Amino acid sequence: MTKPTLKKIATDPSCMDDYDPNAMSVAQARQFIQQFLSPVNEIDTLPVMQSLGRVLAADIISPCNVPSHNNSAMDGFAFKHSAGIKLIKIIGTAFAGRPFTGTVNAGECVKIMTGAVIPAGADTVVMQEKTVTKSDCITVLEAPNQGANVRLAGEDIKINQTVLDKGRQMTPADLGLVASLGIGDVQVFRKLKVAFFSTGDELVSVGKQLAEGQIYDSNRYTIFGMLSRLGVEICDFGVVPDNPDLLEKTLLKAATENDVVITSGGVSVGEADYMKALLAKHGQVLFWKINMKPGRPLAYGKVGNSHYFGLPGNPVSTMVTFYQFVQPAIQALSGETCRPMPLFNVECTEAIKKATGRSEFQRGILFEDAGVWKVKPLPNQGSGVLSSMSAANCFIVLDDTVGNCPAGTNVKVQALQSLI
Ligand code: AMP
Ligand code: MG
C-alpha cells in the first residue's frame, strides 16, 4: 500500500489507522517524521582538513596496507628466530624511515628502532633491555617467542578494506585515519541550509528597551547555537510579530531559499498566534500534541520543498523538541547514518514525581559521589526556566512507562555533551 502524502494526512487525519495527532509518543512522532526525509544528494569534494563534521558521501576504501611494512614495535634487535639462540652478531642498524638494506642470516641481528622496517631474513625483535651488548655481539638474556615485537603489514588496515562508511560524520580521529592512508580529498554531502525565526508580538531583540509585557527573544539564540553545532548553513530571519502578512511573507521566503525552516512560538492555540492558521492554509503541515514534558505542541510538515518544524515557544520546550525531533531530522537530511544517543542508568538521589503515559526530559546534574556517578534533578523544571538548561549537564529521560521515582531509583540519563 502506498503511504499517504503529507497533504492527505493534513486534510484528512482519519486516512491512517493508528494515527492520532492529539496523542503522539515521542518515538512515534520521530518515526513519523523520518519517513518524509530524503537526504541531500549534491556532493562537495574537500581537502581532508576541511571535512571535520561533514558527512561522507562515499565509503573510504584503503588504497594500501597499514602499516605498509612489517616493522618493529620496540627498540631492540631484529634477528632470525631459532631454538636455543643466545649469542648474535650485529651487522647493521635500522632506523624508522631509514631501513637496513641487507639480509639477516641465522646468528646475525640488526639493531632496530621502533617503527623501522624489519629487515629481510629477520622475523623477531628482542627488546634492548633483554640483551647485553659486548663489542659487535649481543647476548640474549630472555629469548622472545618467534614473531615477538613485530607489527605486521596490514595489521591495522588491509588494502581495499572499507575504513569509513558513507553517512559517517567526520571526527578528528577520522581526519588522521584518512590522512594515514595518503588520501588528500574526500567527498562529502553539501551542507544543509536551515532558516529560523521567532514569532510573537511580545518579543524584543537584544539592544532595545523592554516595554511593559515584553520579553527578550532567546529562542533564536539557542536555536542558532544548536544549529551551529550541527554544522549546517544558517539563515536567521529574526523576530516576526504575530502579523499574518509578515509571517506569511517570511515563511515563504525562508522556505524557498532553504532545505529546512524552524520557527518557535505560535503553534499552540493562543489567540494572537496566526502561525498555525497560516501553516494550515499551506496544507502540508501536521499539528501534534506530543505526550511529552516539556514541549507538548509541535508542527511538522513541508512548505514548498522545505521541511518545516514549528517548535513550542517556551524556551526549554524549544530546546528539548529541537534535540528530540529537529536534530535527528537534520542529521538524516544531511545524509548522516542514524546514530542513537547513548543512555546510561544512574542512581537518582532525589524523588521525582511523574505520571505514566508521557515522556519527560528533566534537567539534571550528574555528579560524582565517592567514585560513583549519580544524578540530581534541578529544582525548577518549568518549561520557561532557561537557566535550568544552562545549569544542567544531562537530561533525565523518563519514558512513558515510568511513574513516580523514590530517591535511590535508577533512572536513564543522556549527557548533554554527547548531544551537542
Ligand atoms: P507560544 O508557543 O507562542 O504560545 O509561546 C509560549 C511561551 O513562550 C510564551 O510565554 C512566550 O512569551 C514564550 N516565548 C515564545 N517565543 C519566545 C522566544 N523567542 N524567546 C523567549 N520566549 C518565548
Ligand atoms: Mg506566541
Image (cartoon, helix red, strand yellow):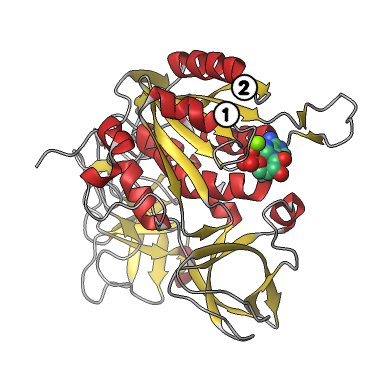
Report the residue at 67% width, 54% height from top.
Answer: 383
Residue at the spot of label 2? 236
The spot of residue 215 in percent (x, y) is 80, 36
Q: Which amino acid lies under the numbered mark 1 shown in the image of this protein?
A: Tyr
Q: Is residue 96 above or below residue 199?
A: below
Q: Is residue 76 above or below residue 10?
A: below
Which residue occupies the extreme left position in the image?
1
Q: Is mark 2 within 8 Å of ligand 1?
A: no
Q: Do the residues under discs 1 and 2 have CB atoms within 8 angstroms?
A: no
Q: Earlier in the sequence, mark 1 or mark 2?
A: 2
Q: CA distance from mark 1 to mark 2?
A: 20 Å
Instruction: Give ligand 2's quarter of the image.
Output: top right
Left or right: residue 125 versus residue 249 is left
Left or right: residue 205 versus residue 343 is right
Left or right: residue 212 versus residue 229 is right
Q: Is residue 297 above or below residue 303?
A: below
Residue at the spot of label 1? 274
| Badge 2 density bin: few <14, some 14–19, many ≥20, Cα 10 Å | some
Splitting the image into 4 quarters, where does residue 361 fall?
bottom right
The spot of residue 328 in percent (x, y) is 42, 44
Left or right: residue 172 versus residue 77 is right
Q: Which amino acid lies under the numbered mark 2 shown in the image of this protein?
A: Asp
The spot of residue 41 in percent (x, y) is 29, 23
Q: Is residue 324 above or below residue 248?
A: below
